Image (tube, rainbow, N blue to C red):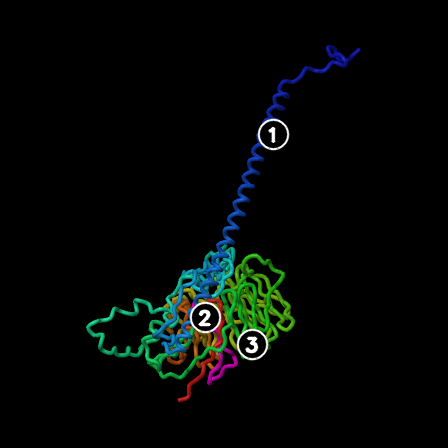
Amino acid sequence: MSMYPGHRMGVAPPANPNANRQSELLDGIRAEFESHQRQIEGYEHQIQVQVQEMQMIREKVYQMEQQHINLKQKYEDEINLLRRQLESRGGGPPGPMNPPLQHAGPSQQPPPQIGNMGGGGVFNGILSGQGGQGAIPPRTSTRRFPISAPQSTASPGPGSKRGQPIGRPPAGGPATPQINTPVPYNGPGQSPQVPTHPTPDHTRMVQHQPPPPPPQSNSLSDLDPERLPNHIKKVKDDWWAIFNQSVPRVLDVDLVHTLQHESVVCCVRFSADGKFVATGCNRSAQIYDVQTGEKVCILQDESIDLNGDLYIRSVCFSPDGQYLATGAEDKLIRVWDIKNRQIRNTFSGHEQDIYSLDFARDGRTIASGSGDRTVRLWDIETGMNTATLTIEDGVTTVAISPDAKYVAAGSLDKSVRVWDCKTGFLLERLEGPEGHKDSVYSVAFAPNSRDLVSGSLDKTIKMWELAAPRNHGQMPGGAMKPVGRCIKTFEGHRDFVLSVALTPENDWVLSGSKDRGVQFWDPRTGHTQLMLQGHKNSVISVAPSPASSTAGGWFATGSGDMRARIWSYTRIRH
């Protein structure tokens, strides 16, 4: 007998109706989920098809743009050929009074912010015409050369993080003031601009118009070369120079080489012996022989992703010429062994794009400046980051003094700072009423290591006299004592000053601007000697050759027009 009365062996318990109901509900939920899943998969497939179609349209547009550029270039070549034939038959030669026809090329999209030329970056700001803080110098607009498919970077300002204000997290770094806003080119390569040519007085048409009075200021960019007498101008096929008539003319300039690139040229730099010049552009650094103009070396890291842009914002030779340091949008510093074309050192640590590098004359210390608001010092022998100097805003430019004791940096916050390289003490903060009114994009030490010059988006260059001897600028309590002073302000550019440099003998200050001009300034008087127009877009970088002397030498320029150029300057003997 069973121990449990009322329950017989082998008899199943009654069915539970609730369990059946739950099973039905679960089956319904499962069926509904599977239906939604199929709908989602269908939507994803449609999206993928549309993305592929958009990509095909994008590629076709780029192909059409390239064909347009090639066709335009072909027509221009034919026009130039006809013009030369006309000249050979006695027609008027092209020049300021018979300017060759020109068509404006398509405007290129600013690199997604150099923060971007990848600058919201520095380049993007400049290329897009944006000013003020948050923009570092980057990509160009009117081009007469083939262009590659649009890149979604902010460089010649900074990259996919591009388009963000420099130095303000989580932005990608300083942007180059964008070059993409076309600036009227008032030279022999373009028809005269209407505003500079008032309607003639027909009642006086028979009278000979007197020559314009000589310029009385540094504003040579405002002058029309077509209306100037020959003795204060020099006009060639695709460049021209105006000499300041209010000061004695002591210099002449000439074009030596044109170095064509496939992208914006972000930087130029000579080797210490003056025999080579390096350029930084998209994905590679290139080295040229100064005498022949021949490209002797291309340095490109093949291990990096080939998709997208990677602008080399700064290049710098080691003093012995064995190495070339490059700084780029990927936040890395690479030190190349030039002879072996191999990377010797790779320095990581910056959190945003690197905008500037400088090699100390000790041959082992490199300074770097980044949109992450830091200046860092590196030792190539130990591979170590020896110092990190932090400021309040993005760093756009750095320079080490010739005696290797000090490092200076310009920033988006309008200041120039100077530190002791060994101790890291902040010695100077150059700002205030005498300082710049907008972001500082370039700094350079004078040969004496006691003075430096700075260029700014406020369109001025300033020369600063630093304290001597340096006492670390400390007052009781650790506060910094401001001791440096501005001794001269150079005014004359009509747009952002993107690059400044001093010749080795301290005879001239050179400046490059978004107004497409290069100017030579006398550091003793503040007067400009000449203004050179040799590019079709912003002059992003200028560099004199260390081999130059008081008699003259070479200098190089890099531009948003995808060209670097090597020039000569010569002192005129009267």
Q: Please, what is the three-letter code of the amino acid marked with disc 2?
A: Ser
The quarter of the picture where residue 36 lies is: top right
Residue named by callout 1: 30
In terms of secondary structure, where does tag 3 sit? strand
Q: Observer-nearest residue: 346 or 127? A: 127
Query: The C terminus lies in which quarter of the figure?
Result: bottom left
Asked if 53 appears above or below 271 in the picture, the reply is: above
Label 3 vs label 2: CA separation? Answer: 23 Å
- Residue 236 in picture, x, y percent from top left: 41, 76
Mark 2 to mark 1 CA distance (whole Å): 67 Å
Q: Which quarter of the rendering shows the N terminus?
A: top right
- Spot occupied by residue 293 in the image (x, y as percentages of width and height): 54, 76
Can you give x and y, in whole percent of width and height, for residue 464 in the image?
42, 74
**How many residues crowd mark 3 within 10 Å: few (<14), some (14–19), many (20+)?**
some
Q: Secondary structure at mark 1?
A: helix
Q: Nearer the viewer, residue 306 or 392?
A: 306
Answer few, some or many: residues within 10 Å of disc 2's Cα (few below 14, many 20 plus, some between 14 and 19): many
State which quadrant residue 348 falls in: bottom right
Give the CA separation, mark 3 to mark 1.
73 Å
Which residue is the site of mark 2?
A: 499
**In the rendered structure, does residue 549 fall within the stretch colored magenta?**
yes
